[in-house]
Each structure stands twice: as C-alpha cells, then as structure tokens.
Amino acid sequence: MVPKSEKRFLRLNLFTIVFTLLLILAGGIVRSTGSGMGCPDWPKCFDQYIPPTSVSQLPTNYKEKYVAERIAKNERFAKTLDRMGKLELADSIRNDQSILVPEIFNVAKTWTEYVNRLMGAVTGVLLVLLAVFAFVYRKSAKRIIVLSIINLVVVGFQAWLGSIVVSTNLVAWIVTVHMLLALVILAILIYTYNYAVELCQKRVVVIAKIWWLKLLVLSSIAASIMQIVLGTEVREAVDAVSKRLAFTQRSNWLEEIGKVFSYHRDMAILVLVLNIWVYKEVKDKFSGKQALLIGNSIGVVLLIQIVTGIILSYFALPPYAQALHILFSTILFTLQYYLYLLVYRTSTYDQEHN
C-alpha cells in the first residue's frame, strides 16, 4: 500500500511537469508575438501588480521612466560581469543602444507577457510545495529532497534571469540560457517523479544488458538539446532581421538569417534518425508497455515537429506554429529523458544483479 503522502507528491510532481510545459508554451507565445517587452519592468508590469488596459492608466513620462530603470539595472549587471572577468560582454551591454528605445504600450502584448509571468509565479509556488512534500522521503530517498530544493534554487535564478531578459531588451544569449534553464528544471522534475514511481513499485523490470542503448538514448537527447539551441539562435536571427526590415517582408525573413537555419534543418534530420533508431531498439528490447508508449509518443511528437517546421518554412513564420514548435521540442526532450531514465535504471539494476 502506497502512503497517501507519497501519492500526493507523485500527483503534484506530475502536475508540475505538465504546468511547466504549459509555461514554456506561454513563453513561446510571448516570443513569437513579440510580447517580451510588453511589461518593461519586473516583477511588476508598468509598476502595477495588475497591468493597465489603456494608455490613460500610465504616467505621462512612462517611457523615460522605464528606460532609466533599465539602464540602471543593466549597469549593475555589467558590474557583476566585470567582477567575473567578462569585460567585453559587460561593455556590450553598457553600449547597447537598443535599450534606449522606449517601448510603446500595447495592451495585447502587455497582457500576453503578464499571463506568462503569472504562470511563472504559479510554477514557483508549485515547486515550493513540491520541496515541502518531498520530506516524506527523508528516510527512504533523501536525493528527492535534495533535488527538489536544488530546483527551487534553479527556478529562483531563472526568475532573476527573466528580469535581466527584460532589462537587456531580450539580449540573444540571455534568452538562450533562459531556455536551457527551463530544460534543467524539467529534467529535475522528471527525475524525481521517475524515482518516486520506482519507490512506489518497489521493483525494476529486468531485461538484457543494454548499456549501448543507454548511450544511444543519451545521444538522441544531446541532439535534441543542440537542436533547441539552434532553434533559439534561429529565433534570435529572425528577431534581428524583422527589426532591420521594420517588421515588413515577413516571407523573406528566413532567407535573410544566414546559415543558422540550414544548420537547424540539418540537425532535425539527425534528431529524426536517432529517434527512429531508438524506437526500433526499444521495441525489440522492452516488453513493458510504458517504454513502448513513450516510444510511440516520441514518434507522434516528431511528426508534429516536422509539420510545424514545414509550416514555419513555407508560410512566413506564423506565430502559432512558432509557439507549437517550441512546445513540442520541449515535450520531445521530456519524453526522451524519461525514456533514458527507464533504460538507465533498468541497465544499472541488471548489472548489479549479474
């Protein structure tokens, strides 16, 4: 009989994984609609907990006010980089003229960004509750407690980095780090969920030694992460081109961004090949339904990724396709990592009992 406290942790952990994916979708919508600067300050939005709905609710000097605040915050961030020895990077932030351009109030973009921030706050609360509930494992699995607390630290850093994203006017590399940290948070959540499930089942299915399959799945995850990074760089290049063309000639944006799009497209082929290979081996080696279900789900997600990628390439980057592309790339990572844990735990268990 599984204690109610452990069932509660499992339910909350699974819900937090799903909600984190929804948060990433919200972030994708923010990015694809250009709403990242919809709230020029942080954590409030136009200095309000509930954002305005019209320009009349804003102070007359709101543009100058938030530009001045961003300059001050960027200077503090640049000094931190100076102390880290990143002098060139610090100078580039200090001399970035784009932060001097004030954001014009747009109610749709403001509320899009506000909903994203609200979902981020809810995710933070969920992670706090998860860390508290994790203490049910203080005798049986202290690593769940440790990892849950580490995730709180990571999400706290993620929130701070979000404020830097705003103050630096969406500086490219910071946006990429912001996305990678979201994957770290997801990975920790997936690990604690999988480990808690194993504790409930009190068993691991034993199959033939499959250390090489573990390496294959890990390689597919690495390729997916690289693909996500390249996708973020494509998005950054598109942002630069769109601004240069004054947000006109949308159908020409991809042609203007250079080789990074070709790299992203070629990496997609590698991701597809690796995952087909993984699916074939999982189907041959695993008799359990769970691994096969994950393998089938990976296939569905890859199909959606291909479709959204084609839509982005041939239909002038529609925002809805961008958001879905980001979401399903993250879902793919989630499924791959969970499958890796199944393979890893199984192969480790098998080696210990032979």
Image: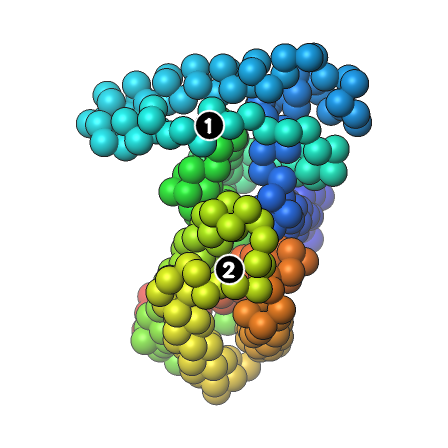
Looking at the rendered structure, which numbered label has been put on residue 326? none
Q: Is residue 157 left or right of residue 114?
A: left
Q: Earlier in the sequence, mark 2 or mark 1?
A: 1
Crowd class of label 1 (few under 14; some 14 to 19; many from 20; radius 10 Å)? many
Along the line of sight, the residue nearer the viewer: 168 or 285: 168
- State the SS at label 2: helix
Q: For mark 2, what is the residue?
A: 253
Q: Position of residue 276 (x, y in %)?
A: 47, 81
Q: Is residue 215 left or right of residue 246?
A: left
Task: Kindly identify the residue that appears in the image at 27 percent across and 27 percent down.
Answer: 91
**Residue 134 image position (x, y, % from top left):** 57, 37
Q: Which residue is mark 1?
A: 99
Task: Classify mark 1: helix, strand or loop.
Answer: helix
From the viewer's side, name the closer residue of 273 and 313.
313
How packed mark 2 is, by other alpha carbons closer than 10 Å (few <14, some 14-19, many 20 or more), is many
- The kind of residue tagged 2 is Trp
Quarter occupied by residue 300: bottom right
Q: Residue at x 43, y 77 (%)?
A: 269
Q: Is residue 202 above or below residue 138?
A: below
Which three-letter amino acid code belongs to the residue tagged 1? Ile
- The residue at 40%/29% (across/down) is 97
Q: Position of residue 318 (x, y in %)?
A: 64, 60
Residue at image position (58%, 59%) is 250
* 241 left or right of 122 in image: left
Pick the residue in front: 148 or 86.
86
Taking depth in this image into account, of 293 and 6 the one nearest to the observer is 293
Q: What is the quadrant of the C terminus in the image? A: bottom left
